Amino acid sequence: MCNLYSETRAVAAVRDLFKVSPNRAAVFEPRNAIFPGKNAPVVRKAADGAWELLELNWGFVLPQQGKAARRVTNVRDDNIDSRFWRESFEQRRCLVPATSFCEPDGKVSPASWNWFALKRDEPRAPFAFAGIWRSWRGPVKKDGPVVEMDVYSFFTTLPNSVVERVNHERMPVILDNEADWLAWMDGPPAAARKLLRTYPAERLHLVQTGYEKQDLEAA
């Protein structure tokens, strides 16, 4: 599970990386901490098929009778065929730009926060989570007003040996190259399923451990 990540690249760099036309890109600021329920940049296909970069709200909305809706930020790869997720996977896949992600270690008190990044020459190389999105209309708080917004979530899978030292259950599905981005966005569901795999341990490393709930590399 991942409920905290960063995206520290400027909008122009993200736009260029994913080959999004300037007139298809929203304006946003780099963020060294992105939390559930907040807006963050997402790359998705517009109605005409072109890629666009805009901000969506993190967490699918799961209504709960008599109380506030639950925000579901992650999709387990072994739960892809559930009614809650399947249509979005088949019809509304997206890329979630990121530069690091965080997993808390609850085995110590107070919990430590552990940040992971790609092992590249640059300190925070960009990548993408394999995401999905949908539109929501309804309340997100108990007895709250009806809101309309587009929301996203991203997939998790089994952890590699680097992440499982902290979280032995799940890690995000990471896509780090153009071929995988194209297959995820434009390929059929069968091709996209093949991308739901554990990221190689030798290409990922722990870059920060402590009590900070933000990636200090960009602070």
Image (spheres, rainbow, N blue to C red):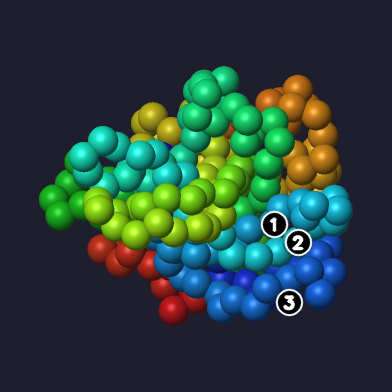
Query: Given contact means CB atoms under 8 Å apart, are the residues at marks 1 and 2 in contact?
Result: yes
Which residue occupies 38% across, 46% down? 71
Q: Position of residue 180 (x, y in %)?
A: 77, 41
Q: Which one is in front, 200 or 79? A: 79
Residue assigned mark 2: 52
Give the class, few, some or many, for how many residues have Cα within 10 Å of label 2's Cα (few <14, many ≥20): many
Q: Single out the mark in the foreground, 3 or 2.
A: 2
Q: Which of the two labelled residues, at mark 3 and mark 2, occupies the earlier sequence position?
A: 3
Q: Identify the element where label 1 is drawn.
A: strand
**Residue kind at label 1, given as amino acid type:** Val
Which labelled disc corresponds to residue 12?
A: 3
Q: Which one is in front, 122 or 2? A: 2
Q: Position of residue 4 (x, y in %)?
A: 41, 55
Q: Identify the element where label 2 is drawn.
A: strand
Give the class, few, some or many, for how many residues have Cα within 10 Å of label 1's Cα (few <14, many ≥20): many
Residue assigned mark 1: 43
Give the class, few, some or many, for how many residues have Cα within 10 Å of label 3's Cα (few <14, many ≥20): few
Q: CA distance from mark 3 to mark 1?
A: 13 Å
Q: Which of the two labelled residues, at mark 1 and mark 2, occupies the earlier sequence position?
A: 1
Which residue occupies 35% across, 39% down? 63
